[in-house]
Image: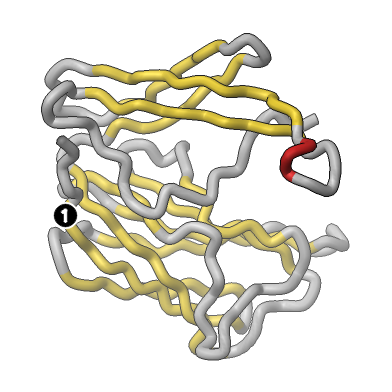
Amino acid sequence: QNPYLTLTGPTRAVVLSVVSNSVRFEVVLKVKSGIYESEDKDLSFLAAKYKTSAWNHSCLINLVATSKLSKLEWTFVRLAKSVEATINIQVIHGSWPDGCRGIFSASTRSLDGMKVLLLSLEDDKLPVTTDSMVNLTRHVACVEIKGELKISVATDYSDGKQFTTHNETVFAPREAGRSCGILKVHSCVMKVIVAWSLVCSSR
């Protein structure tokens, strides 16, 4: 019913090869058919290559590839002169509200409509570790060095009786070091910690 796949990786930035100005996507999708992995049926097996010429601006890319069994479409953003942000969130005061669902996401100023999903709460339970760190499903995002990184949380209530709320914190990118910000959902106060690093080039 929902044709979109939720990606929890990659754990590092995807970079173009400096030799060929390209990146290669490989996809293996299977349909679970039984108890054992050997019983699973193939849904898609394909490889697609994205190649670009010299560029100095960020843009949205759609890439379509077809195999014998399916057609896949990738939507991704090509960022120019970017750095990598490793994101962690820690509850420092209060607790997550009962009955409150939430979506944590990251986005850039230049392409604010394209958000990277960090965590989606289908119920009202915020997953935290023993040291109050939020167990995000994704930690890494990229942003232009001259842009802005926005970390936001949008919430609503499963009973539909309260309005949707939105809170965000904005960071100026750096080549190294750390930045901190605050997110609030009612009485729950969370510290956002961003560790900055350069994006390694690929051969």
- In the depicted structure, whether residue 18 falls above or below residue 188: above
Using the image, determine if residue 93 lies above or below residue 114: below
Q: In the image, is 130 to the left or to the right of 13?
A: right
Which residue occupies 31% across, 38% down?
A: 110
| Residue 133 picture location, percent across and down | 50, 80
Q: In the visual, does 106 lie left or right of 27?
A: left
The x and y percentages for residue 17 are 19, 31
Please name the residue shown 49% across and 15% down the image: 64
Q: Residue at the spot x=23%, y=32% of the render?
A: 16
Callout 1: few (<14), some (14-19), or many (20+) C-alpha neighbours within 10 Å?
some
- Please name whichever residue, 198 or 56, is drawn nearer the observer in this view of the structure: 198
Residue at image location 26% in from the left, 30% down from the top: 58
* Residue on which the image places disc 1: 198
Q: Label 1 sits on what residue type?
A: Leu
Asked where in the image residue 57 lies, by quadrant, the reply is top left
Q: Is residue 182 above or below residue 150?
A: below
- Circle 1 sits in a helix, a strand or a loop, which is it? strand
